[in-house]
Amino acid sequence: NAEEFTSEELVAIGPFEISIGMLKSISKESGKVLYDLGVHLKGPTITSDTRPNFVLTYCIDVSGSMAGTKLKEIKAAASRFVDRRDLVRDRVAIVCFSDQARGLWALTKDRDQLLNVISRLSAEGNTNFEDAVYKSEEDLNRASEASTVLLFTDGQATLGSPDAAISRAEQMR
């Protein structure tokens, strides 16, 4: 809801500015007063010129459990992510995984090639999260810019150790 709160001036806390205020109102119930707390938080303005370059690894589950609608939706989502990237500054890698992970496309800025790779994905095999995490980590280790792995999966691991994958992913943070 948008309410007008009386508040003090914004106070800088790190890269943010914040103010807090109270709104007093009379309840519909006789004799009760209501107080609503309002928080105004203003973050830093980051433009496409001032943001860091990114290296993104799209780690896509292509195991048998992804067949049909799941893979179709994931391919559409991954394609939208590629379309929205500023590929003049960012680089994208694609890792797909089922029984084992394989890099389908190394770090690139070529939008058409990325979209072509995504469109050709098909489902087969089991789900090996552990191998997917290791392969994605290789891409992260090659990058000097801010790096992120986007995992596209239904979460049904059938091979490898999910616990080892989680542990390894936590170490990558």
Image (tube, grey):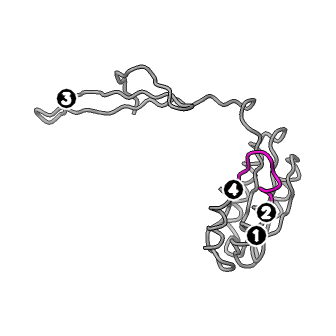
Label whose residue precedes the other's in the sequence (1 or 3)? 3
Residue placed under numbered mark 4 in the picture = 150
Q: Picture coordinates of residue 43 (x, y %)?
A: 55, 31
To which quarter of the image does residue 138 belong?
bottom right
Q: Position of residue 105 (x, y in %)?
A: 86, 59
Residue at left 88%, top 53%? 113
Provide the secondary structure element on which disc 4 rests.
strand
The reply to whether the C-beta atoms of the residues labelled 2 and 3 are less than 8 Å apart is no
Per the model, the C-alpha gap separating discs 1 and 2 is 7 Å
Q: Which residues are magenta?
A: 139-149
Instruction: Tell me whether the residue at label 4 lies in contact with that at label 3, contact meaning CB atoms closer than 8 angstroms.
Output: no
Instruction: Say which residue label 2 marks.
Output: 95
What residue type is disc 1 on?
Answer: Phe
Separation of residues labelled 2 and 3 (CA atoms)? 58 Å
Q: Which mark is residue 40?
A: none
Residue at x 31%, y 28% (from the top left corner): 22
Question: x%, y% of residue 53?
Answer: 77, 40
In the image, residue 76 lies in the stretch drawn in magenta? no
Q: Earlier in the sequence, mark 4 or mark 3?
A: 3
4 vs 3, front mark:
4
Q: Which tag, 2 or 3, sits closer to the chain's start? A: 3
Cα separation, mark 4 vs mark 1, equals 13 Å
**Kind of residue at disc 3:** Ile
- Could you tell me if the residues under marks 1 and 2 are in contact, i.e. CB atoms within 8 Å? yes
Q: CA distance from mark 4 to mark 3?
A: 48 Å
Report which residue position mark 1 lands on.
97
| Neighbourhood count class around disc 2 (C-alpha, 10 Å): few under 14, some 14–19, many 20 upward | many
